[in-house]
Amino acid sequence: MAAQMTAPSLRPTTSPLPPPAAVQQLHHYAYRAKDAEETRHFYEDILGLPLYHIIQSDYVPSTGEYCPYTHFFFRLQDGSFIAFFDLGNDEAALPSPNTPLWVNHISFRVDTVADLEAMKARLEADGIEVLGVTDHHIFKSIYFFDPNGVRLELTAQLADEFQMLEESKTAHARLAEWTARKQQWRKDKAAGQAAEALKPQQNDRPEFGGKAAA
């Protein structure tokens, strides 16, 4: 008796995904600029970031749409960039209508608190309003806006690598607790039984709460 032939499986075979690529550093972060020269003066002459590269075109490579632009980059010490698009119409980006102005920002690191205070002096000498020096315990910061309405932070790290490693050991547990509470908050809100926004389970900065209540 002839051996029966087994029909090939019609189920698709799946190959394992490759591991995540090692993301080395930030390459660039891009914003809209109202005016390229005004932006260059701020980042190069005041903050000391050299203008390093320019790309100009009539069409957007990623989408193919017609939108003339000048795309220009300022280099940080680690080789990363902050970049801007001047779209040639003297219009600035509008702030997000549902997000406080202090939320969306980018922070640059300086080496010491003395460097932080020196940069504050440079900015204020050019008529730029600066908040801080603010003590965040693991780092100190100053805050200000660039000519395009982008909120910037300069940060001097205080905690060493060992302290940051210790901090990292509780990060997942704290976020998981927040997520569980937020899931319950969503259910309560759907039932009309929750506050407008969920508060965190602990307050790492009680000193500021006291000032606000005073």
Image (cartoon, rainbow, N blue to C red):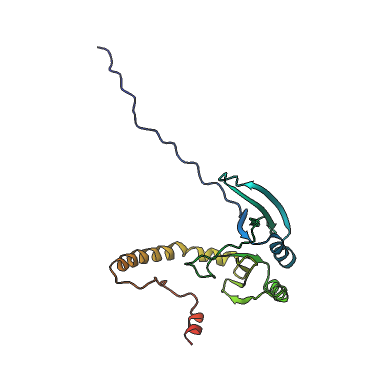
* Residue lying at the far top of the rendered structure: 1
Residue 74 lies in quadrant? bottom right
Number of marks in picture: 0
Query: Which of these two is toward me, 120 or 31?
Result: 31
Query: Which of these two is toward me, 41 or 189?
Result: 41
* Residue lying at the far left of the rendered structure: 1
Tell whether 195 sits left or right of 137: left
Tell whether 189 sits left or right of 27: left
The relative height of residue 202 versus residue 81 in the rendered view (above or below) is: below
The relative height of residue 178 versus residue 85 in the rendered view (above or below) is: below
Q: Residue at x 61, y 62 (%)?
A: 91
Residue 35 location (% of width, % of height): 67, 61
Residue 117 location (% of width, % of height): 69, 75
Residue 151 lies in quadrant? bottom right
Q: Residue at x 51, y 84 (%)?
A: 211
The relative height of residue 142 versus residue 19 in the rendered view (above or below) is: below
Q: Quadrant of the N terminus?
A: top left
Query: Which of these two is toward me, 206 or 93?
Result: 93
Q: Residue at x 65, y 67 (%)?
A: 147
Q: Residue at x 49, y 83 (%)?
A: 212
Residue 149 location (% of width, % of height): 60, 67
Residue 37 location (% of width, % of height): 72, 61
* Residue lying at the far front of the rendered structure: 89
